[in-house]
Image (cartoon, grey):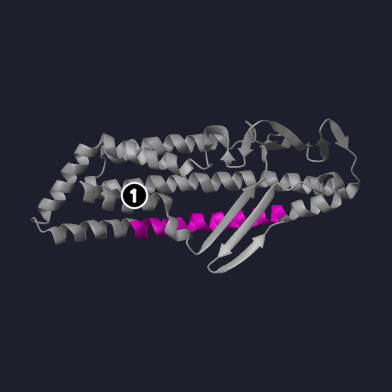
Amino acid sequence: MTYFHNTLIASTVTAALTSSAVYAKESCNVDLSAGFTINTTTIEFLQTNSEDKHSLYKIMNGNQLIIGNDKIALNDNQEALLKQYDEKIRQLVPQVKSVAIEGVDLAVEGVNLAFNGLLGEGNSVGADLTKELNVIRAQVITNLSIEKGISVGVEGLESEELLGKDFEQRIDSAVEKAVLNSMGSILIAVGQQMMAADGEEDSFDTRMENFGANIEREMTTRADKIEEKAQALCMDVAKLDALEEKLKAKIEPLATTNIFTVTQTNDDEVNHHSK
């Protein structure tokens, strides 16, 4: 049982879901110094700490800058720059949604590949886990909606904590729950595999290792497209970071604000897009 849990679940399913090896050569970190809310008419940036939350500034209707209760007078060039900034942020929302949804879909595919291969088509483990992951998928779709309104904190989406620091933990918990609820079926399947190996431990170990390797190979291939989208998203956030610098340089009341900081790493080469 210990061997099965450590080798098959940890190395196969969890590896398939997180696909961390795929991202080993390239990474992108986006740091937020403040949260923000976005709806159909307004983007508001909010400074938060343990004691309070207050507005830094807001953009209304794409071209009006509000600081406190004051509307800041802008010339045509400043207004055009502000509008560009507003549009760039809004354009990121469907990109983030697409990457998030495809990430959950990748998890569903990994689950079905793993458990259908071990337990056969139509098994309850894969079905239960797919159901749990589809709940998360539906929440991503609902909560990444400008029409409904989106609240982003410094650690990710505040609503349901989706895509924040606990997002991967939610998927891991769904895996653990489904496995524990169906442990009897899993142990039976493992027993059948051991019998098929005719009691030879090396043969059974090889079967499990090959099974895990096949799942990892399949999921790595599927993850490549998501990696490409994630890297494209990173580059767009880096452009937004550069645009914020122009906004700070051209509009004096925003000179000391710094919402976005992007750090990109490629192998041993590190490029910093920071202030």
Residue 150 can be seen in this image = yes
> Above or below — where is 202 with respect to 79?
below
The C terminus: image quadrant? bottom right
* Residue 230, x across and y down, in percent: 55, 54
- Residue identified by numbered label 1: 13
**Magenta stretch: dominant secondary structure:** helix
Q: Which residues are magenta?
A: 216-241
Which residue occupies the extreme bottom position in the image? 268
Please report the residue visible at 63 percent of the width from the left and 33 percent of the height from the top.
50
Residue 229 occupies which quadrant of the picture? bottom right
| On screen, residue 25 above or below 180 | below
Observer-nearest of 7 and 87 = 7
Residue 41: tell me if it is visible.
no
At x 47%, y 62%, the residue is: 24
In this picture, is 135 found above or below 114?
A: above
| Picture coordinates of residue 115, whole percent (x, y) | 28, 46
The residue shown at (29%, 39%) is 179
The residue type indicated by label 1 comes to Val
**Residue, x 70% and y 56% (percent of image)?**
239
**Residue 239 counted in the magenta span:** yes
Q: Is residue 161 left or right of residue 65?
A: left
Reply above or below: 9 against 264: above
Q: Residues within 10 Å of mark 1 (few under 14, many from 20)?
A: many
Magenta-colored stretch includes residue 194: no
Residue 207: give x, y in percent of width and height: 20, 58
